């Protein structure tokens, strides 16, 4: 763990004692039980935070931000971060990633410079979240394999670069007409349905005003963007419940619902079944 001591040395002992820590070659995974208030961290690695609930206000490069659940926070090397108030929390994920890993992947993508994430808050796909869970499970195994962990590290780093906006600017859209805008919006919703995406998120992604987008979307798709998002979430929920590998609570979380009651009400309204009844079929 010595390669991450520049960060760990800043964390009070009483917090470390309540934090699960799993170390791989290029990533260290933390599961803290408290947000640390009053300490300003100087980050030398990439810092990725996946909260389980809304976080207390924090300062990132002196900008006030409150991270909502189902949005991932990214902090670049050289950034500063501090939580304004100490607060207890449900266990959440916090990853430190060595810069060499992301830079090596960027070189494979023909980008020679240092990678920088351009947004503090990012929607994320269900695939990325499942990669985090796989890394945790493998690191907890008594027979864990370093080769497996190396593979998961590479997959996580690659998905972060592909999904989040960076200075690499891999996917600058060249949109010519309304159909192009709607196609990109549908792809965005289908990728990030598990995250807390908003109308503003979609419109920023495709560079169009909210009013113009809603009008175009209803004309082309036949429903509002919100209705389409719910439809995508419920279809994915049906798929997960059918496998019998996921509980109703896990399905609700993986499909982007704020709570199990909200998920259950929406599921029954759109399918005619409760999630439990559908799963039992």
Image (cartoon, rainbow, N blue to C red):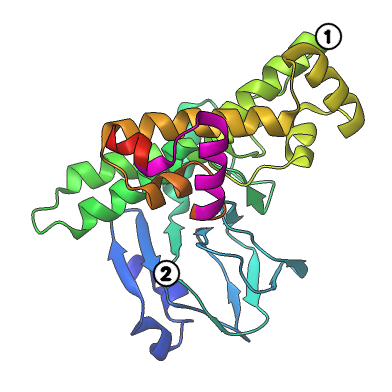
Question: Viewed as shown, does residue 241 lie left or right of 181?
Answer: left
Residue 280 drawn in magenta: no
- The alpha-carbon separation of the residues under discs 2 and 1 comes to 45 Å
Q: Residues within 10 Å of mark 2 (few under 14, many from 20)?
A: some
Residue 224 at x, y percent in the picture:
76, 27
Residue hosting label 2: 91
Question: Viewed as shown, does residue 30 lie left or right of 140?
Answer: right
Residue hosting label 1: 177
Image vertical order of residue 214 relative to residue 175, above or below = below
Q: Are marks 2 and 1 in contact (CB under 8 Å)?
A: no
Q: Residue at the spot x=61%, y=69% of the render? A: 55
Residues 246 and 61: in front is 246
Question: Viewed as shown, does residue 92 lie left or right of 219?
Answer: left
Range of residues picked out in magenta: 261-276
Q: Quadrant of residue 170?
A: top right
Residue 83 at x, y percent in the picture:
63, 77
Q: Is residue 138 visible?
A: yes
Q: Residue at the spot x=40%, y=52% of the render? A: 249
Quadrant of the rendering where the C terminus is positioned: top left
């Amino acid at each position: 763990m010595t390669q991450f001591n520049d960060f760990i040395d800043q964390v009070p002992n009483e917090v470390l004692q309540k934090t699960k820590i799993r170390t791989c070659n290029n990533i260290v995974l933390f599961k803290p039980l408290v947000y640390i208030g009053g300490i300003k961290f100087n980050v030398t690695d990439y810092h990725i935070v996946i909260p389980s609930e809304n976080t207390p206000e924090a300062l990132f490069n002196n900008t006030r931000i409150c991270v909502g659940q189902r949005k991932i926070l990214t902090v670049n090397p050289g950034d500063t971060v501090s939580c304004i108030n100490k607060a207890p929390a449900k266990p959440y994920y916090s990853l430190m990633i060595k810069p060499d890993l992301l830079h090596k992947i960027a070189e494979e993508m023909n980008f020679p410079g240092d990678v920088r994430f351009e947004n503090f808050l990012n929607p994320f796909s269900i695939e990325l979240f499942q990669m985090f869970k796989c890394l945790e499970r493998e690191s907890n195994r008594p027979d864990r394999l370093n080769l497996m962990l190396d593979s998961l590290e590479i997959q996580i780093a690659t998905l972060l670069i592909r999904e989040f906006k960076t200075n690499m600017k891999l996917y600058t859209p060249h949109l010519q007409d309304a159909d192009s805008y709607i196609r990109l919006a549908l792809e965005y919703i289908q990728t990030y349905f598990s995250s807390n995406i908003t109308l503003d998120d979609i419109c920023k992604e495709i560079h169009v005003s909210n009013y113009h987008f809603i009008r175009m979307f209803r004309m082309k798709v036949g429903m509002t963007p919100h209705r389409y998002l719910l439809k995508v979430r419920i279809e994915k929920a049906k798929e997960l419940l059918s496998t019998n590998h996921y509980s109703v609570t896990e399905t609700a979380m993986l499909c982007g619902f704020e709570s199990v009651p909200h998920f259950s009400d929406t599921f029954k309204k759109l399918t005619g079944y409760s999630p439990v009844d559908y799963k039992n079929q």
